[in-house]
Image (cartoon, grey):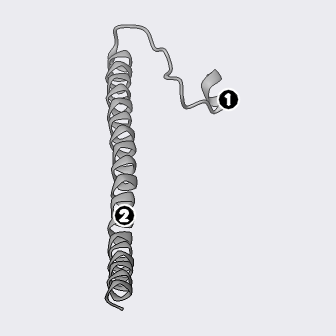
Amino acid sequence: MAMEAESDLSRTPEVGGRDEVAGVAGALESLVRRFEGFIGDIRRAAAGLDERSAALDEGAEALQRAPEETGQQISDVSASMTSIAD
């Protein structure tokens, strides 16, 4: 078979006929298509998880910066009040 010589596993062999071998080949081809669909679903889900993970990372970084910025603002207000009081 050409597929064996080329080691191309992306193609399914074409088997014609009405015997048991053709029936099994048809069932295997159907199974392979379902697996391809399942793998595609997994890839799409993984891409979605990557996007959500990146968004969560951005949110976590923003939350991490917030106390530092608030602390700096409090310090600035305190310095301004001290300046006004003097």
Find residue 18 and report its image quarter. Answer: top left
- The amino acid marked with disc number 1 is Glu
Dot 1 corresponds to which residue? 6
Find residue 62 and report its image quarter. Answer: bottom left
x then y, percent, for residue 15: 45, 14
Whether residue 49 sits left or right of residue 7 in the image: it is left
Q: Which of 62 and 26 is in front in this view?
A: 62
Q: Crowding at label 1, few (<14), some or many (≥20) Cα neighbours within 10 Å?
A: few
Q: Is residue 17 above or below residue 79?
A: above
Dot 2 corresponds to which residue? 62
Residue drawn where x is 61% and y is 25% of the image:
3
Q: Crowding at label 2, few (<14), some or many (≥20) Cα neighbours within 10 Å?
A: few
x then y, percent, for residue 37: 34, 30
Q: Between marks 2 and 1, how big is the CA–CA gap?
A: 52 Å
Q: Which residue lies furthest to the bottom in this view?
A: 86
Q: In this view, does 11 lie above or below 52?
A: above
Q: Residue furthest top?
A: 17
Q: Which of 50 and 3 is in front in this view?
A: 50
* Sooner in the amino-acid sequence: mark 2 or mark 1: 1
- The amino acid marked with disc number 2 is Ala
Q: SS at mark 1?
A: helix
Find residue 4 and report its image quarter. Answer: top right
Residue drawn where x is 38% and y is 21% of the image:
25
**Quadrant placement of the N terminus:** top right
x then y, percent, for residue 36: 39, 31
Whether residue 29 sits left or right of residue 1 in the image: it is left
